[in-house]
Image: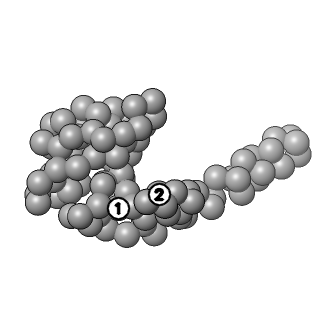
Amino acid sequence: MRHVFFGLLLLMSMLAGPILALAHAPAPSQNNPILVIAPDAADVIAAAGGQVIGPTTAPLAALATGDAGFADRLNASSAWLVTDGQWVAELCGVTS
C-alpha cells in the first residue's frame, strides 16, 4: 500500500508543473495562433470556424487561427483549454 501512495505522489509531482503552467496561461491574442486542447481538437476548431495550422500528429491539441470571434466560439464549445499559442511555443523554447 505504501508503494502505491509513493507512486501516486511521484506521478502527481511530475504532472503538477505542466498543469499549473497551462492553468495560468494568458488569454488568446488575435495576432497569434491559438492553442486548443480538446478531445478532438480538429473537429472543435472546424466547428468554431477556424483553421488548424499544426501540429498534425497531436491527439488532444492543435494550433489554429480564425476570425475575431474565433476564441470566444472555442471557449463556448467543448474545448478544454484555449490559450495563446505563441506563449506555449516560447514556454517550449521555440522562437520565430
Q: Characterize the local packing of mark 1: few (<14), some (14-19) or many (20 or more) Cα atoms within 10 angstroms.
A: many
Element marked by disc 2: helix
Say which mark, if any, is on residue 18. none
Indicate left or right for 6 with 60 as reference.
Answer: right
Which residue of the protein is positioned furthest toward the front in this rendering? 96
User: Comparing marks 1 and 2, which lies closer to the viewer?
Assistant: 2
Q: Nearer the viewer, residue 73 or 70?
A: 70
Q: Which of 64 and 5 is in front in this view?
A: 64
Measure the C-alpha gap from mark 1 to mark 2: 9 Å
Which residue of the protein is positioned furthest toward the right in this rendering? 2
Number of disc labels: 2
Q: Do the residues labelled 1 and 2 touch (CB within 8 Å)?
A: no
Q: Identify the residue shown where x is 83% and y is 49%.
A: 6
Q: Is residue 36 above or below residue 72?
A: above
Q: Characterize the local packing of mark 2: few (<14), some (14-19) or many (20 or more) Cα atoms within 10 angstroms.
A: some
Q: Identify the residue shown where x is 57% and y is 59%.
A: 93
Q: Identify the residue shown where x is 31% and y is 67%.
A: 27
Element marked by disc 1: strand
Disc 1 residue type? Asp
Q: Identify the residue shown where x is 40% and y is 31%.
A: 56
Quadrant where the image shows the C terminus: bottom left
Say which mark, if any, is on residue 89. 2
Label whose residue precedes the other's in the sequence (1 or 2): 1
Q: Nearer the viewer, residue 14 or 61?
A: 61
Q: Position of residue 10 (x, y in %)?
A: 78, 51
Disc 2 residue type? Ala
Q: Can residue 82 be seen in this view?
A: no
Q: Where is residue 55 in the image (x, y as percent from the top left)?
A: 41, 38
Q: Position of residue 19 (x, y in %)?
A: 54, 57
Residue at the disc numbered 1? 84
